[in-house]
Image (spheres, helix red, strand yellow):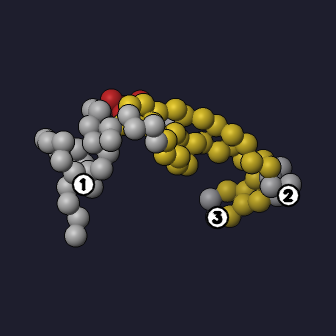
Amino acid sequence: MRITGYRALTTRQDWGRSVGDSNGVFPTGVLDIALLLVDTDEGITGVGMGSHVELAKVFAAAPASSCRFVSGNGDSDEPERVH
């Protein structure tokens, strides 16, 4: 299975009330949520939440190789075995 591409999406979550914590307060209760969809050559799409900052640089640095590797991209098509 190889990573073939990604899509960066943004959605909004409306809590319907003021929300916040030590990282910040959102009086309107409306937050922008960054989503990342990672596509594979086997038709599987992974979904994650997180920043889109410098996303293109991360994917440019990781050539299309097996996404099953645990500690990074290796030199072969064989996944690293974890026991």
**Three-letter amino acid code at disc 1?**
Ser
In the picture, measured across the screen, residue 56 lies left or right of residue 37, that is: left
Identify the element where label 3 is drawn: loop
Q: Which residue is mark 3?
A: 22
Q: Residues within 10 Å of mark 3 (few under 14, many from 20)?
A: few
Residue at 32%, 38% (x, y): give it: 2
When asked about the image quadrant of residue 71, the answer is bottom left
Q: What separation in Å lies between label 1 and label 3 (alpha carbons)?
A: 33 Å
In the picture, measured across the screen, residue 32 lies left or right of residue 36, that is: right
Q: Which residue is mark 1?
A: 71
Q: Which of the pair 22/53 is nearer the observer?
A: 53
First along the sequence among labels 2 and 3? 2
Q: Position of residue 45 (x, y in %)?
A: 49, 41
Q: Is residue 27 visible?
A: no
Residue at 68%, 64% (x, y): give it: 21
Q: Contact, CB < 8 Å: mark 1 with mark 3?
A: no
* Mark whose residue sits in front, 1 or 2: 1
Q: Which of the pair 17/67 is nearer the observer?
A: 67
Q: Position of residue 7 (x, y in %)?
A: 52, 32
Q: Contact, CB < 8 Å: mark 1 with mark 2?
A: no
**Three-letter amino acid code at disc 2?**
Arg
Q: Is residue 5 visible?
A: yes
- Give the position of the N terminus as an image quadrant: top left
- Which label is found at residue 17? 2
Q: What separation in Å lies between label 2 and label 3 (alpha carbons)?
A: 17 Å
Identify the element where label 1 is drawn: loop
**Three-letter amino acid code at disc 3?**
Ser
Q: Which of the pair 40/15 is nearer the observer?
A: 40
Q: Position of residue 36 (x, y in %)?
A: 52, 41
- Give the position of the C terminus as an image quadrant: bottom left
Q: Position of residue 29 (x, y in %)?
A: 80, 52
